[in-house]
Amino acid sequence: MTGLVSGAIGVEITLQRGQTSYRLPAMSAFEGKQIISVSYCNANNVPRTSSGKTVFPLSSDRLELCLSDIHSGMKRKYSVADIENRLDQLPFNQTIDFRNSELVLINPDNPDIWHDTTVYLIFWYGINADNSQFSKSIILPLEVTINSPKIFFQPPLSLQNTHPVQLMLTFPGFTPSGRKAIDRSSVSDKFITLAGKDKMLFSQIPAYYFCQSHLKTPWFLDLPSIDFEKSSIISLKDDFSEAEVLFFNLMCV
């Protein structure tokens, strides 16, 4: 994915035996927004959704996304396998009519395997742009301790009056404070919500997508600010007797 991201929302679509077409849920947060990318969460990277449902376990080539443009009414079909397999994601430039868009199961055999599992898609909105550059940027460390199912970011004073343009989850082994940070294998059950001053900007996005080291072209934030005191991380793990530490590099201008 390339571009300046203004927000993203995780969308869950639960499959039922005997049904092959599913309308996308209508969400007011998407109204008037330019969708610049769509991500598909496969069961290897994200085995459960943020609500705890089992992610669709079969190959994504069984799925097709049919998106309707809100202005022209024209529909365009996308293979979900193509969406999944592109490293930087397919570029989108649509204001989508979610009420007339749908997910289609194009190979409905073996219903006992996929019945009551959930297809988890992320819709990213913002502005498509190439190689966004920011001058005079600084990198600030941000540690978050996970010791309960939902934890709010604990921003240090150094983050006050900053303009974040990139939030990158990293795995340094140990944080600057000397605490052991979790490794990449431990992020599949964690989901990030980022809040602005008066609304949610990123809602239930798998932490996996904030690991940008594998991307050829990292993505940047196009936000006035982030209210970290209202921003949170959900963890689906069962045992919180031992706290975990997530470490982020926060690029600010």
Image (tube, grey):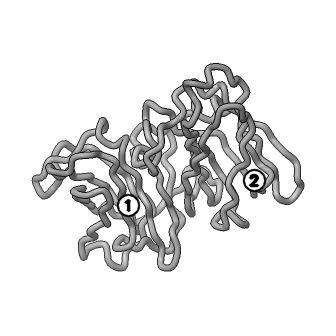
Q: Please give the residue where the numbered disc 2 appears in the rendered image.
A: 94
> How far apart are the two marked residues, 1 and 2, measured between alpha carbons?
28 Å
Q: Is residue 43 above or below residue 28?
A: above
Regarding residue 139, the answer to whether it shows in the image is yes
Question: Residue 232: where, in percent of width, then height?
Answer: 37, 63
- SS for dot 1: strand
Question: Residue 22: where, in percent of width, then height?
Answer: 72, 43
Given the image, on which type of amino acid does mark 1 rest?
A: Met
Q: Is residue 173 above or below residue 152?
A: above
Q: Residue at x 47, y 62 (%)?
A: 134
Compare marks 1 and 2 and give the one earlier in the sequence.
2
Q: Nearer the viewer, residue 175 or 140?
A: 175
Residue 40 sits in quarter: top right
Q: Nearer the viewer, residue 62 or 211?
A: 62
Give the farthest residue toward the top: 110
Q: Are marks 1 and 2 in contact (CB under 8 Å)?
A: no
Q: Nearer the viewer, residue 162 or 150?
A: 150
Quadrant into which the C terminus falls: bottom left
The answer to whether 247 appears left or right of 31 in the picture is left
Classify 10 Å Cα crowding around label 2: few (below 14), some (14-19), many (20 and above): some
Q: Please give the residue where the numbered disc 1 appears in the rendered image.
A: 251
Question: Residue 15: where, in percent of width, then height?
Answer: 62, 38
Q: Which dot, 1 or 2, sits closer to the camera?
A: 2
Question: Residue 144: where, in percent of width, then height?
Answer: 25, 59
- SS for dot 2: loop
Q: Residue at x 45, y 50 (%)?
A: 50
Given the image, on which type of amino acid does mark 2 rest?
A: Gln
Q: Residue at x 70, y 47 (%)?
A: 92
Q: Is residue 42 above or below residue 112?
A: below
